[in-house]
Image (cartoon, grey):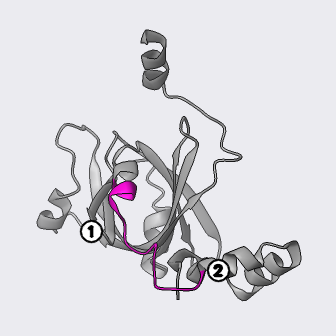
Amino acid sequence: MGHKFAEIAFTPNVRQLQEEYGSRKSYARMESGPDYHDQLTDKEAAFIAQRDSFYMASVSETGWPYIQHRGGPQGFLRVLDEKTIGFADFRGNRQYISVGNFKHDDRVSLILLDYPARARLKILGRAEIIGMDDADRLKKLQLPDYRAVVERGLLIKVEAFDWNCPQHITPRYTAEEYEAVLKD
């Protein structure tokens, strides 16, 4: 089996294009051997804990992809174990597109970026909606000092992940990061 992200993402059409453009040989090597990149390690957990936002994709009943930005205080996205991440879902624009999509298709894709370090982590998984009536599981996701209204929790069972190359990531800095650099 090998690299779990490749197993999911490298469909026959993708492999055909890799062959046409000359990258298939190197990706074929990563697909062999024992399974890996399906359980988060300390490296991924540390990266996730430092994020204050991420992008999340879902798929609608009509087959359209939908991408949404999710944000909160640093560490609002939590690693619960090597196969599970989750977050308290704060009230936003109240369109409920992602949540509605998960009722139809629980597949989810996340992209987490560290712009200053030019690092990117992609995660594929399956989303589970945690209702307000499930206090025990929701408690693990809540942030007591953050004043946003929590409407539900989302747990994501990690199927696979991959780190991307930094080649085209433009460094960007938050106001806090910029101020820290100026103080040094």
* Residue 145 image-quadrant placement: top left
Q: Magenta stretch: give its range.
A: 31-45
Question: Which residue matches tag 2?
Answer: 29
Q: In which quarter of the image is residue 74?
A: top left
Q: Is mark 2 on a helix, strand or loop?
A: helix
Q: Is residue 15 above or below residue 72?
A: below
Q: Which amino acid does label 1 sit on?
A: Ile
Helix, strand or loop for disc 1: strand
Give the quadrant of the C terminus. top left
Q: Which of marks 2 and 1 precedes in the sequence?
A: 2
In reply to whether residue 102 is colored magenta, the answer given is no
Residue drawn at the location 21% of the way across and 51% of the way down:
142
Q: Residue at x 54, y 34 (%)?
A: 116
Residue 6 placed where, x, y %?
A: 60, 77
Q: In this view, does 70 lie above or below 62?
A: above
Residue nearest the viewer, comparing 130 with 171: 171
Q: Nearer the viewer, residue 178 or 43?
A: 43
Which of the 4 image quadrants contains residue 57? bottom right
The answer to whether 170 appears left or right of 81 in the picture is: right
Q: Which residue lies furthest to the left in this view?
A: 136
Looking at the rendered structure, the kind of residue marked 2 is Arg
Residue 96 position, x and y percent, is 45, 61
Q: Which numbered tag is attached to residue 130?
A: 1
Q: Residues within 10 Å of mark 1 (few under 14, many from 20)?
A: many
- Left or right: residue 81 versus residue 183 is left
Q: How many marks?
A: 2
- Identify the residue at image location x=79%, y=76%: 18
Few, some or many C-alpha atoms within 10 Å of disc 2 (few <14, some 14-19, many ≥20)? Answer: few
Dominant SS in magenta: loop
Residue 182 marker: none
In the displayed image of the protein, which residue is found farthest to the right?
20
